[in-house]
């Protein structure tokens, strides 16, 4: 950093503010640093010989002199004020516009949430048939008892939530689930009839002195080449789950779905009963 004090000033020196160049005259370069300079300047229209220090980093000293000593002739400040107010107004308009957009988004989100939670509006979009199917899927997927359809609180929930609809009876619920199961079996059989090869997985376990056989099926979709899986059966096995009983039960499931000649692999644990059932 170099610090120099000069008695004369080079004519190439200029104040960095154009609006002050015409009213202030540089008398002397007071200090010269690498990043900024300090000048001694004089107001051209001032009778006083007092010199002011002007720092190229800020014009506050010059502005203060004009405000204090030449307020009646200084009009540029008013222009600057107007410009500042214009900028503030533009900023305010932008903020107001941005705020309005944010408020509109919030209102839109609230409207969507209200639409979702407003059962009376949702009811117009849900038919009795759709409601029955939703109740059926709830009972199946959550393993709920059929007498759920007879529970007073559940009936009240549906009546209030889906105005104009009613809860199907327990008998109708059981009948619909049976029909739904039969349609699912037909769909599975139709899908298996179009395949050449299938694989299965099998497992057997006991709980509370009851034994069960669990079978799943897996194949590759010939069009999308994606793996597809489904549950074939969960069957209760009476008696000990010996190898011959396991083989008989698995074969009965394969025959039911007409896939006995399509199963090429079956994955099981290494229990001796399963190993022997395939020999």
Image (cartoon, rainbow, N blue to C red):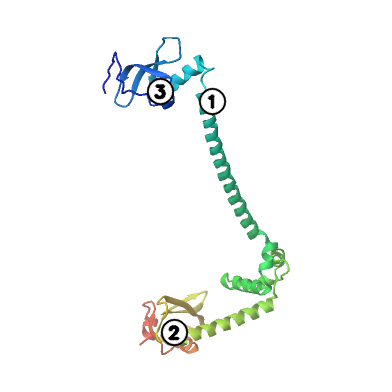
For residue 189, side relative to residue 261 (left or right): right
In which quadrant will I find the N terminus?
top left
Question: Is residue 251 or residue 39 the one in the foreground?
Answer: 39
Q: Residue at x 29, y 26 (%)?
A: 34
How many tags in the picture? 3
Work out which residue is located at the far left of the displayed protein and give it. 2
Q: Residue at x 48, y 86 (%)?
A: 253
In which quadrant will I find the C terminus?
bottom left
Spot occupied by residue 64 in the image (x, y as percentages of width and height): 47, 19
Spot occupied by residue 223 in the image (x, y as percentages of width and height): 42, 80
Spot occupied by residue 246 in the image (x, y as percentages of width and height): 44, 84
Residue 263: which quarter of the image?
bottom left
Residue topped by disc 3 = 21
Spot occupied by residue 123 in the image (x, y as percentages of width and height): 68, 66
Residue topped by disc 2 = 246
Q: CA distance from mark 3 to mark 1?
A: 18 Å
Mark 2 burial class by Cα count in 10 Å: few <14, some 14-19, many 20+: many
CB under 8 Å between callouts 3 and 1?
A: no
Disc with the residue nearer the chain's start (3 vs 2): 3
Closer mark to the observer between disc 1 and disc 2? 1
Residue topped by disc 1 = 78
């Amino acid at each position: 950093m170099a610090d120099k004090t000069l008695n004369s000033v080079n004519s190439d020196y200029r104040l960095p503010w154009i609006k002050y160049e015409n009213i202030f005259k540089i008398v002397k370069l007071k200090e010269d640093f690498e990043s900024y300079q300090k000048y001694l300047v004089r107001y051209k229209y001032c009778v006083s010989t007092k010199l002011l220090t002007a720092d190229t980093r800020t014009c506050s000293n010059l502005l203060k002199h004009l405000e204090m000593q030449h307020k009646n002739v200084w009009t540029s400040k008013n222009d600057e004020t107007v410009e500042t107010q214009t900028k503030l107004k533009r900023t305010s308009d932008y903020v107001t516009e941005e705020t309005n957009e944010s408020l509109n988004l919030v209102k839109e989100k609230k409207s969507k949430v209200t639409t979702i939670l407003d059962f009376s509006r949702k009811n117009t979009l849900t038919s009795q048939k759709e409601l029955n199917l939703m109740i059926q899927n709830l009972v199946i997927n959550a393993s709920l008892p059929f007498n759920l359809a007879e529970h007073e609180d559940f009936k009240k929930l549906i009546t209030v939530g889906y105005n104009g609809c009613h809860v199907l009876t327990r008998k109708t619920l059981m009948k619909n689930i049976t029909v739904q199961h039969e349609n699912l079996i037909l769909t599975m059989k139709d899908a298996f009839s179009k395949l050449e090869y299938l694989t299965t997985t099998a497992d057997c376990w006991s709980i509370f002195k009851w034994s069960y056989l669990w079978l799943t099926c897996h194949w590759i979709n010939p069009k999308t080449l994606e793996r597809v899986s489904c549950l074939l059966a969960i069957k209760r096995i009476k008696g000990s789950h010996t190898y011959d009983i396991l083989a008989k039960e698995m074969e009965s499931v394969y025959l039911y779905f007409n896939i006995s000649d399509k199963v090429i692999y079956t994955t099981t644990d290494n229990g001796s009963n399963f190993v022997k059932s395939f020999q």
